[in-house]
Image (cartoon, helix red, strand yellow):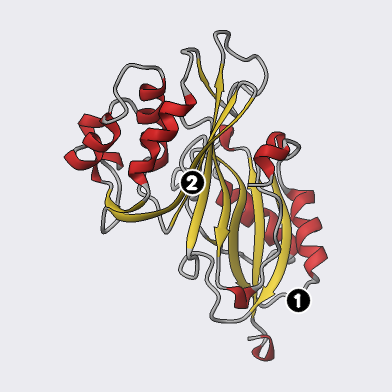
Amino acid sequence: MAAVGIYKIALGVEYRGTRYRGFQRQRDGVPSIQASLEQALSKVAGGAPVTLSCAGRTDALVHASGQVVHFDTRVERSMHAWVMGANMNLPGDISVTWAKAMPSHFDARFCAMARRYRYVIYNDQIRPAHMAEEVTWNHRPLDVERMREAAQVFLGTHDFSAFRARQCQAKSPIKTVHHLELLQHGRFIILDIRANAFLHHMVRNIAGVLMTIGAGERPVEWAGQVLEAGVRRTGGVTAHPYGLYLVQVDYPEEFDLPARYLGPHFLSGLEDVAAR
């Protein structure tokens, strides 16, 4: 593409979603991650418009430490310039972490093979004053072993209709969960899940079921019963968005995208969590 004057650039992006209605640009001008990035990148491109495609459109108030986006441009800049120039023009809660020139057939959304999320629960009787909108507070004592046992039912390929939001636009509720672990460090409980794709609110609904079981309000078997029922109303309350992070997107090896530690930042120093 460079030979004909068109460059495809992939970027790694992280953000705190608290101030935003979600990643996707909003018609009514409400702040979004996409709009902020496009405006910043357009300034680096000398005013030329920039339109982004992303690996996954995170919801309102949801965060990311491993989002991947791409755009096409006729403007030639170094990768360093795309990163530093964008960050100079972005608000403090959005950062570009890397940039790489890509072949024409790369697509941040359609080339993604799997996505990984972490849902961070702060389990304590007293609500946290710090990071109050970056973790989900649960005041009930949670039994992590019960949560781990219940979580096993979600591994593999299933119909996740009971875990999708009413407004979900996915064509099929059939998804494959490759990995699901419950990690614990002090008062943090981290639900770490990787799948080929996710339905709208799927992770938050799984988290809600597991927290209910962890609190002893439902038996371990309830997770399988909800999954088998295939009806959203059987699955209880959708967990808050605050603790949810898109932490990784997997692509074929041929693209060789830069790798960073699994986020979010405040977990990166915890060896028993960060090394997973």
Pick out the residue farthest to the top. 126
Q: Of callouts 1 and 2, which one flags the residue occurring earlier in the amino acid sequence? A: 2
Question: Mark 1: few, some, or many residues within 10 Å (few <14, many ≥20)?
Answer: few
Q: Residue at x 68, y 46 (%)?
A: 275
Query: What residue sits right under mark 2 in the picture?
Result: 58
Labelled pair 1, 2 in contact (Cβ < 8 Å): no
Residue type pointed to by label 2: Thr
Count neighbours of disc 2 (C-alpha within 10 A) and say few if under 14, some if 14 to 19, many if 20 or more.
many
Q: Quadrant of the N terminus?
A: bottom right
Is 247 situated left or right of 80 in this image? Answer: left
Residue 5 in picture, x, y percent from top left: 67, 85
Residues 148 and 259: in front is 148
Question: Which residue is more in the foreground, 90 or 125?
Answer: 125
Q: Residue at x 71, y 70 (%)?
A: 100
Q: Residue at x 57, y 32 (%)?
A: 18
Image: 174 above or below 30: below
Q: Amino acid at mark 1?
A: Glu
- Residue drawn where x is 66% and y is 62% of the image: 11
**Badge 1 element:** loop
Q: Is residue 103 left or right of residue 157?
A: right
| Spatial CA span between label 1 and label 2 | 29 Å
How far across and down, in percent of the image, does residue 193 sit?
48, 46
Q: Which numbered circle lies on residue 76? A: 1
- Residue 136 image position (x, y, % from top left): 52, 25
